[in-house]
Amino acid sequence: MENPQNQLKQALLQGKRQIGLWLTLGDATSAEICAAAGFDWLLIDGEHVPHSLDSVLAQLRAISGYPGTQAVARVPSADPVIIKQYLDMGVQSLLVPMVQSGEEAAAIVRACRYPPGGERGVGGARAARWGLIPDYLHKADEQIAIIVQVETRQALDDIDAIAGTEGVDGVFIGPADLSASLGHLGQPAHPDVAREILHVIDRIRTAGKAPGILTRDPEMLREATERGALLNAVGLDASLLAAQAQNLAKTHAVG
Ligand SMILES: O=C(O)C(=O)C[C@H](O)[C@@H](O)CO
């Protein structure tokens, strides 16, 4: 059995834009429904969703039945122990929130790599198909995509160091937190925020890394894409369900 190729990482290296959806329901069936819908990637959100490791694993398994759709998982924090658990479950594309400096980005890269290049602990696990992938320990690092999230003023101030960190594959902008940090809480499309986002995309591209963003704002999506954003999440599962459910209820409301 071969170590699975990370198709998302390959696509980003080739400069191919990838369209994704944020999974916030924490449920394997809804993850599978979204995988069947045909997105290039789905984000299993371990930061804001009340997940257990088991529910992350169940979603990974559900998505793995759809080879055209890649799973990305967001850890709750940059804790190396949690990163190790996600990687051991078979996550190959990792999103790490709230990265503030080049030093933090370098520590995340070390947490994702086996010695001597890093500090990932060694354990037989699903990632290695319980020992059935020959030489997994020597093949794992190259298939892991490390995507760090910048979403504060402090991170923007160190963007060149963060994006320039060896081993970082992509830098993902979080407009909700960034707008809060820039003094525009709840206004991710505020012109000041939009200006910073486009500038950051330029810096990420200059560092030779893949820029990414979650935005439901069509104008922001268009501008970010034109500037070179490659990893573009365009919606959230819960919001889709909420909007459609409300529409249907309104359509059939009596009285
Ligand atoms: O700051 C952001 O934007 C993100 O990191 C994404 C949010 O966490 C997501 O939950 C949508 O609001």
Image (cartoon, helix red, strand yellow):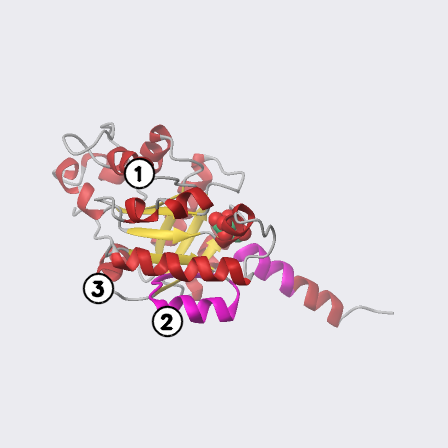
Q: From the viewer's perspective, is residue 35 above or below residue 143?
A: below
Coordinates of residue 123 in the picture (x, y in percent): 24, 28
Residue 87 is labelled as 1
Q: CA distance from mark 3 to mark 1?
A: 24 Å
Identity of the residue drawn at 56% across and 48% down = 180
Q: From the viewer's perspective, is residue 202 above or below residue 101?
A: below
* Of pointers 3 and 2, the one earlier in the residue sequence: 3
Mark 3 Cα-neighbour bin, 10 Å: few <14, some 14–19, many ≥20: few
Q: Can residue 235 be seen from the camera position used here?
A: no
Coordinates of residue 167 in the picture (x, y in percent): 22, 44
Task: Identify which amino acid the numbered label 3 is placed on.
Answer: Gln
* 250 with respect to 65 (left or right): right
Q: In which quadrant will I find the C terminus?
A: bottom right
Question: Label 2's element?
Answer: helix
Q: From the viewer's perspective, is residue 222 above or below residue 134?
A: below
* Of pointers 3 and 1, the one earlier in the residue sequence: 3
Identity of the residue drawn at 33% across and 61% down = 202
**Between 160 and 170, which is closer to the camera in this rendering?**
160
Which numbered mark, 2 or 1, is in the foreground of this view? 2
The part of the chain drawn in magenta is 216-244
Q: To which quarter of the image does residue 187 belong?
A: bottom right
In magenta stretch: residue 108: no
Task: Identify which amino acid the numbered label 2 is placed on.
Answer: Glu
* Residue marked by disc 3: 14
Residue 226 is labelled as 2
Question: Label 1's element?
Answer: helix
Coordinates of residue 26 in the picture (x, y in percent): 51, 45
Q: CA distance from mark 2 to mark 1?
A: 33 Å
Q: To which quarter of the image does residue 119 belong?
A: top left
* 42 with respect to 164 (left or right): right
In magenta stretch: residue 241: yes
